[in-house]
Amino acid sequence: MNASAAAPVAPKGGGKSPLIAIFLTVFIDLLGFGIVIPLLPVYTKAYGASEVELGLLFSAFSLMQFLFAPMWGRWSDRIGRRPILIGGLFGTAASYALFAVANAMLPPEGATGGSTGFVMALIFASRFLAGFFGANISTAQAYIADVTTQENRAKGMGLIGAAFGLGFTVGPLVGGELSVIGTWVPGAAAALFSLASATFAWFKLPEPDRHSPSTRAIPQGTQVRHVLAEPRLGVVYVLIFLSVVAWAGFEAMFTRFGLAAFPTKFGLEHSIDRATVAQVIDSAKYTGRYLFFIGVVSAIIQGGLIRRLVKRYGEVGLSVAGPFFLAVSFAIVAWAGRFMPGTEEGWMWVLIGCGLMPLGFGLNNPALNGLVSRAAPEDQQGAYLGLYQSTASLARVVGPPLTGAVFKLLGPAWPFVTGAGLLFLATGIAWWYRGRFGSTFARGPAA
């Protein structure tokens, strides 16, 4: 771990150079991650995986993040932020290279048994490996805290959010288009992006000065007990969990839903059960385009409209509107898939639902993040926002296999019925929360 020794120490004062470097590092890394996401449902269908297996595949990444993010945080405190970030990027590149190798071994048309099972095992291994090394994103957030003052810290953290949003928006489009060249190409491109990010960080990312006073640390058990004993905080974490379970289920099952209910809109002439492996693989580019559309609308809302809406309605008001719009959008998609599959009118309603979806997502996430920050003690912001990320990771572990099982048992529309139910429940809880605690936010954080 000599990476930190080769770089100068960053000044504590919010200078632009380290912030730009960390932004580019995270963006390039998340671009590689976004490249892979739309391919998982398509590729695994080509390998004969069930919806439950697909859900478990999505959960593998989040499970590793949930388990190992605290470990990476502790190691970054001991040996430095820079070596953890750079080492994580090299490890992420290895995971994407394994993903590329697995998909270069696509079995012949109609093959079953050992060949497909071995490929799926490699894909699972690549996702576990990616989640293990991807858990160091919290180190990037700690880096921002190290190189910024309290006055400009929120702006610095916003750069992490912007890097995430751009990576998730552009990545699926790039991955979908590259899949046309070959099944191995997106994974190889993601590996190259991670290597480029690691190389950039090696030369441009200095080790920050971490010898200034910091907030007091508290044991995680004490933190959880505080959340459970303080409804003003605890209810927000319930809302986070419900919302992310529903959204993670959408990410995992939307492509499978489209392939089953509206195959022609994904480039298939027939239903997914009658399509060839080559036709299924070719549908990946359509998935990337749809996810790109959702990402762009969400980015516009979070980047431009959210500030005005927060000023007018506050985080508490938006915490009601966000899950409500998401629930309605899920219900529209479910209704179209259940009662109008394969029709132009049905697909029009799916697009309407997908157009409304990023509005709800764009309102919900910043609102809940803001509520946690405002309700948490001032000197423990990092700890409680970290618990926010842990709660979201746990929800991403639960959501995909849950909706995958629902898909397999009840049909393609029912994962969205399930998501809509969870989000309407979240809306009701948020409405109660607004009436119970809305006025208290004028008085600052919880004791």
Image (cartoon, helix red, strand yellow):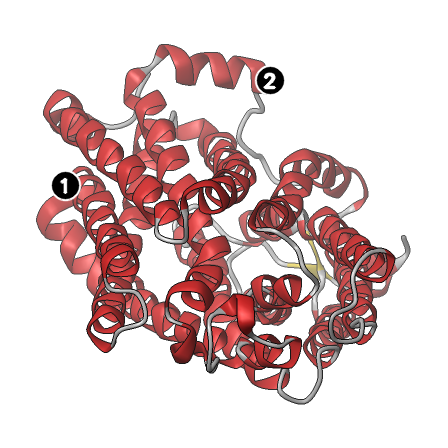
Q: What amino acid is found at the position of numbered circle 1 in the picture?
A: Gly
In the image, residue 177 lies at what x, y percent? 56, 85
Say which mark, if any, is on residue 416: none
Q: Percent x, y for residue 281?
A: 61, 77
Q: Which of labels 2 and 1 is toward the front?
A: 1
Closer to us: 242 or 112 = 112
Q: What residue is pinned by disc 2?
A: 219
On the rendered structure, is 436 left or right of 388?
Answer: left
Quarter occupied by the C terminus? top left
Disc number for residue 317? 1
State which quadrant residue 299 falls in: bottom left
Residue depicted at 56% across the width and 39% down the height: 397
Q: Residue at x 36, y 75 (%)?
A: 293
What amino acid does circle 2 point to? Pro
Mark 1: secondary structure: helix
Q: Tell me what residue is drawn at x 30 percent, y 65 percent.
A: 341
User: Does the image show residue 100?
Assistant: yes
**Residue found at x 32% / y 71%:** 342
User: Alpha-carbon distance for marks 2 and 1?
Assistant: 32 Å
What is the crowding at mark 2: few (fewer than 14 residues within 10 Å), some, or many (at least 20)?
A: few
Above-or-below relation of 253 to 320: below
Q: 112 or 253: nearer the eye?
A: 112
Image location of residue 376, percent across then percent down: 37, 27
Look at the picture and state if 14 lies above or below 59.
below
Is residue 189 left or right of 222 when viewed as pictured?
right
**Viewer-proximal residue, 172 or 4?**
172
Quadrant for residue 315, please give it: top left
371 sits left or right of 110 in the view: left
Residue 324 at x, y percent in the picture: 19, 45
> Is there a contact, CB below 8 Å, between mark 2 and mark 1?
no
**In the figure, 188 relative to 423: above or below?**
below
